Amino acid sequence: MSVRISRQHWDGLLAELDLARRQRHLVTYRALLERLQLPTPAMQTLTAALEHLAALDARAEQPLRSSLVISQGASRLPRTGFFECVERLGRFSGPSDGVAAASWHASEVARVFEFEYPQPVKPE
């Protein structure tokens, strides 16, 4: 199944992540879903968009902005699928629920907070 995101929702996602980065805070999947008002299947669309963004950031050798999105649970980490994605991208290796994952995630978040991402070119 192919999941697509509209330009408006994509731009909204990038804006939300940029705001989180500038304010140096994390955002939950649920908060993003509420703010973006994605159509059904919203979680699948958000997941696909975050994985696509991770691939774009990895290709550009930038810190992964999708690391700013976390679960509401006690772990305060992204979902398992995030770690599977970053493993496919060659950024992390290991179990998604251990100390290594938490340590890698904290390090990646710090890198995102410090990085200045280029602004996308807007069509006129």
Image (cartoon, helix red, strand yellow):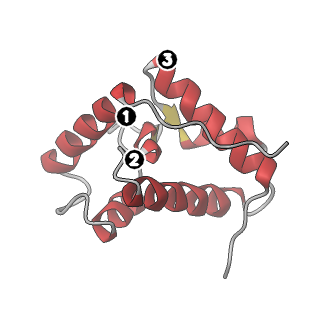
Q: Kindly report the distance in space between the C-alpha atoms of the residues bearing marks 1 and 3.
A: 11 Å
Q: Is residue 63 above or below residue 58?
A: above
Q: Farthest right residue? A: 124
Q: Which residue is mark 1?
A: 112
Q: Kindly report the distance in space between the C-alpha atoms of the residues bearing marks 3 and 2.
A: 16 Å
Quarter-of-image position of residue 3: bottom right
Quarter that holds the N terminus: bottom right
Q: Kindly report the distance in space between the C-alpha atoms of the residues bearing marks 1 and 2.
A: 7 Å
Q: Position of residue 43 (x, y in %)?
A: 64, 57
Quarter that holds the C terminus: top right
Q: Amino acid at mark 2?
A: Leu
Q: Amino acid at mark 3?
A: Gln
Q: Camera-side residue: 50 or 121? A: 121
- What secondary structure is found at the residue carrying circle 2? loop
- What secondary structure is found at the residue carrying circle 1? helix
Check whether the beta carbons of the residues at disc 1 and disc 2 lie within 8 A of each other.
yes
Q: Position of residue 111 (x, y in %)?
A: 30, 34
Mark 1 burial class by Cα count in 10 Å: few <14, some 14-19, many 20+:
many
Nearer-N-terminus badge (1/2): 2
Mark 2 burial class by Cα count in 10 Å: few <14, some 14-19, many 20+:
many
Q: Which residue is mark 2?
A: 64
Q: Residue at x 78, y 61 (%)?
A: 40
Q: Is residue 89 above or below residue 24?
A: below
Mark 3 burial class by Cα count in 10 Å: few <14, some 14-19, many 20+:
few
Q: Which residue is mark 3?
A: 23
Q: Position of residue 64 (x, y in %)?
A: 39, 47
Q: Amino acid at mark 1?
A: Val
- What secondary structure is found at the residue carrying circle 3? helix
Q: Residue at x 18, y 63 (%)?
A: 93
Nearer-N-terminus badge (1/3): 3
